[in-house]
Amino acid sequence: MFHDQEYFTTLVKIALPIVIQNFISSSLNAVGVLLIGQLGDTSVAAVGLANQVFFLFSLMLFGITSGSAIFTAQYWGSGDLHGIRKIVLLCLSLTLPPGIFFTAIAIGFPQVAMGLYTRDPAVIKLGSDYLQIIGISYLATAVSFTLASQMRSTGSVRPPMLVSVVALGLGTLVNYTLIFGKFGLPVMGVRGAALGTCLARLVECAAMLAVTYLGRFPTAARLADFTGLSRKFFQHYSVIVLPVAANETIWALGITIYNMIYARIGTEAIAAINITSTIDSMAFVVFIGISNASAIMIGNRIGAGEEEKAIQYARRALILGIALALVMGALVLLFSGTILAYYKVSETAAANARGILTVLACGLWIRVTNMTIIAGILRSGGDTRFAMFLDICTVWLVGIPMALLGTFVFHLAVYWVVTMVMADELTKFIGGIYRFRTRKWINNLAHSIQMG
């Protein structure tokens, strides 16, 4: 199973740039939280909760773009370049409206948005200041998100990585300068962090547009590519993509509910959640790369009519993910204390963070398996409705009730509530493995419809 040199060469070629991009992104995000962490629990909580608006927005974008990428990967496998450009335009037509909506929320109603998460007036004030600035970048994010995801699905993973790395590096430098008032500039604190991040996202969008169109990539779509789009194709596109978008949006709402519940435990609790989220994101970068690469490779094989090879690739991705997750979980447990020592937060927040990291590290292999099955396997085969059902039901029918019980009935510490919420992942794991074994997830989208 693991002696196929072509498989691993292709996996590394696709996954490595994605891993590097996500590692640098997560590292710089961790640095950002670390910088904000020097300002205390309130600032960490404010930025973390304000970013829940972007989290919801970004998951909606991820749903639309990853759903579209299912088609892009399969059309790339079948050599249909005209179809790829139509997918890019359709994807943009779905990502821009949420960009407008979330921009209006962030700029026009920041205090209302923050009030959904916390009653702490200091946290609401700081978070609102952050939201009003960062909201300026949401439309640009929709464009760069779309172009990068579709480009990666054609196997061109290096350009989006380089663009992202440069933009994030610039954002981190500006954040440091403005948060603490370096090089003669005023001390801006949380507002400085918002300005730096906003600038980075605007630069990223401009760079992705330039790379896509000046480099004449297959994803360089123009309005003329909309001509001849058949109604049958649009309907089929919607049937596949909208469940993924709904999946990510409703799932993200569930995660947002988790954070609302954690915030009710206390400012120290949500500060700990925000700190551990950045560390957990860094632990996940390898698996995001493997999952995304597997989705592209599996989608390409299905599009080329090689279903047995697609199944073989899926099995390898699962085994590889579990093995690496066990190692990564052990490393997180080993170094968690050292990492947390760099954050200048209260003893209560630090103790909560240690407990949460222990839970997340022990359950890492289950969460990695679930991500690989849903994002890397089921969706690449066009089985988006079952993936949606599995993801949404486990969060809303298992995870959220557990969080409510742990917080408002049993009055547990936040790390015990997180432990109860892991029942969501365990349920998802059982359902995902069952679906994978049935092989019902394989659907050749490239051959099932006719383009106009």
Image (cartoon, rainbow, N blue to C red):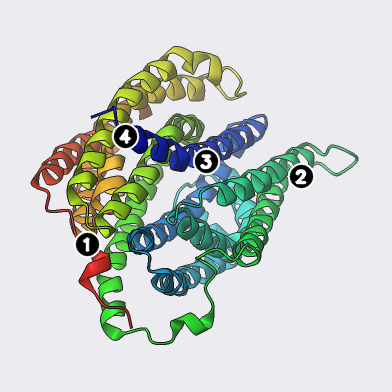
Mark 3 and mark 1 in contact? Answer it, CB < 8 Å. no
Task: Specify few, some or many for label 2: CA neighbours under 10 Å numbering under 14, 14-19, or 20 or more.
Answer: some
Mark 3 and mark 2 in contact? Answer it, CB < 8 Å. no
User: In terms of sequence position, does the residue under pointer 3 or pointer 1 come before the other?
Assistant: 3
Q: Secondary structure at mark 3?
A: helix
Task: Specify few, some or many for label 3: CA neighbours under 10 Å numbering under 14, 14-19, or 20 or more.
Answer: many
Would residue 419 be visible to someone looking at this image?
no
Q: Position of residue 21 (x, y in %)?
A: 55, 41
Q: What's the CA distance linking mark 3 and mark 2?
A: 34 Å
Q: Position of residue 428 (x, y in %)?
A: 20, 41
| Tag 3: amino acid | Pro
Image quarter of the C terminus:
bottom left
Identify the image quadrant of residue 226.
Answer: bottom left
Q: Secondary structure at mark 2?
A: loop
| Tag 2: amino acid | Met
Q: Is residue 80 above or below residue 345?
A: below
Q: Circle 4 is placed at which residue position?
A: 368
Mark 3 and mark 4 in contact? Answer it, CB < 8 Å. no
User: In terms of sequence position, does the residue under pointer 1 or pointer 4 come before the other?
Assistant: 4
Q: Circle 3 is placed at which residue position?
A: 17
Residue shown at the point (19%, 51%) measured from the top left: 307
Identify the image quadrant of residue 165.
Answer: top right
Q: Residue furthest left?
A: 438
Mark 2 and mark 1 in contact? Answer it, CB < 8 Å. no
Residue shown at the point (54%, 14%) measured from the top left: 338
Kindly identify which numbered label has been placed on residue 129. none
